[in-house]
């Protein structure tokens, strides 16, 4: 068995099955396979999902084998007419399917052990591509196949995850380890908040554009930005050194907007800071309706620092539960720096917390005015050193405004805890 190539290898994954194209199914197999291939130093450069249509699948396989060293197909190895993976790969490679009596006999024995008679249709699973090696399935009836052709490898795996994982670990990883040249992939995850995606890219692109390796990707969602850098080198030490070469200047440019170097979300970073300082926090929420408290409590062990909160949507509850005076509400309104400050101070006093965060705003779609438009929010943080109130104007729908508000609130507390606010 010869190595595929001396250069770094790329792989493609094809998930087969019309059910995978419905709204209720997620292709988790490709995530597992990507992780295992990355551990070998193989980069997954293409993924696709194709229904049970032989010609389309054959075309996809033909294209994949022409551009990538490793092509893995999951699913479509069952006994029914809509299981077309074997036929499609045979068509793509111009090879015959050959009936293997030994596989058929093993299938019959498997059925006999459960006191069942094997249906004639199950014999379809005993057809093997010409020149292919059979991959044993210890969890199901569908054997996999390993085919080497024109310097590439096609691997056919069953669709059920427990079958695929067992087969891949037992039958494929040892073979791939012999074929794949020694490579190492390492990834750096930087998380940033408090700036638009376009500003982030303009800031750091002069650094990362100098490099094709590592590859840099920027992801954005609800005020949270992620910078992923993936380095692929001959050794782990080389990959880590290359990542450091690129990430150090990027981190310097990001400054205090960089909140995580480990990939941890903001609520985890803030929780760790609270725990380190033996501090506690409570929340008072209006427009976010409990979303901020939910982010705190989504982290295991959050009871170390999160005491609880108040969802005071109405003015009457702001007064009754938090002690916001009716005069403040009447003069300044529920969405105002004065009310936000009173909410935070009241929540801290009633819970004896180190810090309290209050949120009030207009999430929309209705309720805005010329002076107080939809998307206007106030966040207040009360602590022993006083109360900080910050306002923002967010754009978007109701959900987006509320999520952005929780991100803003957590970041303000992070800054307060680290002396940046």
Image (tube, grey):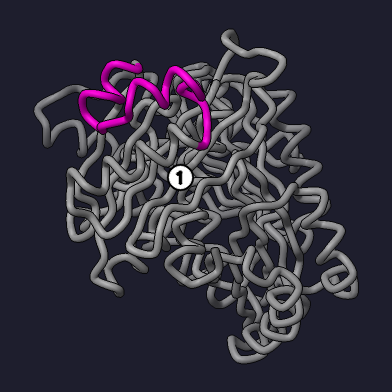
Q: Is residue 59 visible?
A: yes
Of the pair 222 and 165, the residue shown nearer to us: 222
Residue 213: quarter of image: bottom right
Q: Is residue 412 left or right of residue 61?
A: left
Q: Residue at x 52, y 45 (%)?
A: 407
**Which image quadrant: the N terminus?**
bottom right
Q: Residue at x 51, y 16 (%)?
A: 81
Q: Is residue 407 left or right of residue 69?
A: left
Residue 68: quarter of image: bottom right
Of the pair 200 and 387, the residue shown nearer to us: 387
- Where in the figure is residue 379, as x and y percent of width and height? 49, 41
Q: Which residues are magenta?
A: 315-337
Q: Residue at x 34, y 54 (%)?
A: 166
- Where in the figure is residue 344, as x and y percent of width and height? 35, 43
**Position of 403 relative to 280 (above/below):** above
**Position of 31 relative to 182 (above/below):** above
Q: Secondary structure at mark 1?
A: strand
Residue under label 1: 380
**Which image quadrant: the C terminus?**
bottom right
**Position of 241 relative to 143 (above/below):** below
Q: Residue at x 72, y 33 (%)?
A: 91
């Amino acid at each position: 068995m010869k190595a595929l190539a001396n250069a770094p290898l790329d792989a493609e994954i094809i998930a087969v099955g019309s059910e995978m194209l419905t709204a209720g199914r997620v292709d988790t197999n490709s995530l597992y396979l990507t992780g295992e291939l990355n551990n070998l130093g193989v980069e997954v450069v293409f993924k696709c999902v194709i229904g049970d249509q032989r010609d389309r699948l054959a075309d996809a396989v033909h294209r994949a084998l022409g551009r990538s060293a490793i092509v893995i197909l999951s699913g479509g190895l069952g006994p029914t007419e809509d299981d077309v993976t074997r036929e499609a790969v045979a068509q793509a490679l111009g090879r015959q399917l050959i009936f293997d009596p030994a596989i058929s006999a093993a299938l019959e024995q498997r059925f006999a052990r459960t006191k069942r008679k094997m249906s004639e249709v199950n014999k379809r699973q005993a057809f093997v591509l010409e020149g292919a090696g059979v991959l044993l399935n210890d969890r199901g009836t569908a054997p996999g196949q390993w085919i080497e052709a024109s310097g590439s490898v096609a691997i056919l795996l069953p669709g059920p995850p427990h079958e695929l994982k067992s087969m891949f670990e037992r039958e494929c990883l040892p073979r791939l380890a012999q074929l794949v040249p020694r490579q190492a992939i390492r990834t750096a995850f930087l998380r940033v908040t408090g700036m638009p995606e376009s500003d982030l890219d303009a800031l750091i692109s002069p650094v990362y554009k100098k490099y094709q390796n590592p590859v840099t990707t920027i992801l954005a969602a609800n005020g949270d930005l992620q910078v992923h850098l993936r380095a692929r080198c001959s050794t782990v030490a080389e990959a880590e050194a290359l990542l450091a070469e690129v990430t150090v200047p990027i981190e310097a440019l990001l400054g205090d907007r960089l909140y995580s170097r480990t990939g941890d979300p903001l609520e985890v970073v803030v929780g760790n800071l609270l725990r380190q300082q033996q501090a506690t926090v409570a929340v008072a929420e209006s427009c976010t309706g409990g979303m901020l408290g939910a982010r705190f409590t989504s982290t295991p062990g959050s009871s170390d620092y999160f005491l609880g909160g108040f969802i005071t949507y109405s003015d009457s509850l702001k007064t009754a539960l938090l002690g916001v005076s009716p005069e403040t509400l009447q003069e300044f309104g529920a969405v105002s720096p004065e009310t936000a400050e009173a909410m935070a101070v009241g929540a801290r006093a009633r819970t004896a917390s180190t810090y309290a965060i209050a949120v009030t705003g207009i999430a929309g779609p209705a309720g805005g005015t010329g002076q107080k438009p939809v998307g206007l929010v106030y966040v207040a943080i009360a602590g022993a050193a006083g109360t900080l109130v910050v306002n923002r104007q967010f754009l978007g729908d109701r959900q987006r405004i509320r999520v952005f508000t929780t991100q803003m609130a957590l970041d303000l507390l992070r800054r307060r805890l680290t002396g940046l606010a």
